Image (tube, helix red, strand yellow):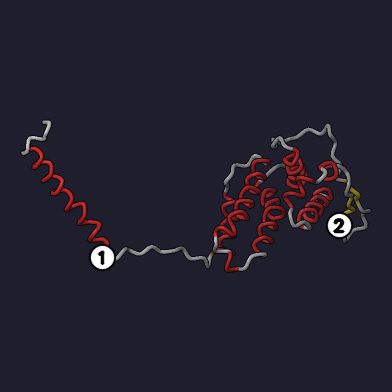
Amino acid sequence: MSCVTTALLIFFSFTFTASNNSMNNIMDYNPHCFISGCPTVTCQVNDNTTVQPITASTGYSSTESWTTACGNSSRCLIFCDFCERAFGSPSMDCLSLIVEKICLPDFHDSMLLLNSTDWCIWDNVKSLYSNFSVCTEEVSDCLLIPWPNQLVKEVFVNIHYQYFVECTTEEFSDPPPAIVFALVITPICLIPMMVSLVVLKTKNGDGTS
């Protein structure tokens, strides 16, 4: 892995895991600091050799051309630039890393603020669940990766296994036999009564046919 890739991975991980609201931070974060040459890292090519350290800057030229397609928003450009440098292009591996460092921490932190007994109450978790879903969708859209995809499905399965596996669904039982009998017999009894009324009115000359 190159020095540039290492620097981006370290900086990316530090930036987005140090916040309680990572998705909002990246929206407010200055993209020029992320993309341009703010952080500089020194990498040793091989610890067992005497080669001089290589100093690399994560600089970005505004005239640099994109080799892959990307979403149009400024936040998308940040994501795509990171994927371009760290993975060569927006990919499922890059999506996995961004979801792990941005979307999941917010969801996990919010869930841990609740009691485990509250996890099974939908009103308590629906906003957290929705925010996480939107986060994965926005990042996927930025990287032009179809959503939902296999990665996102696996992440949701893991979330369900971690937080909701103990939740039980309410089972509906059949009503008592007496109620079932009443509901069935009532329309059966009404039919001959209605037929009798029609015949009676016809015999009395009130029918129009």
Vertical arrangement, residue 51 with respect to residue 78, above or below: below
Residue at (83% x, 31% y) in the render: 63
Where is residue 2 shown, x and y percent of the image? 81, 49
| Residue corresponding to mark 1 | 177
In front of the other: label 2 or label 1?
A: 1
Instruction: Residue type at mark 1: give it.
Output: Pro
Image location (x, y in percent) of residue 122:
55, 58
Left or right, 24 with reference to 172? right
Residue receiving disc 2: 46
Q: Residues within 10 Å of mark 2 (few under 14, many from 20)?
A: few
- Indicate left or right for 46 with 203 as reference: right
Residue 195 lies in what quarter of the image? top left
Mark-to-mark CA distance, 2 and 1:
80 Å
User: In front: 24, or 84?
Assistant: 24
Q: Nearer the viewer, residue 119 or 35?
A: 119
Most foreground residue, 161 or 164: 164
Furthest residue toward left? 203
Please report the residue visible at 54 percent of the width from the left and 63 percent of the height from the top. 120
- The front one of 20 and 75 is 20
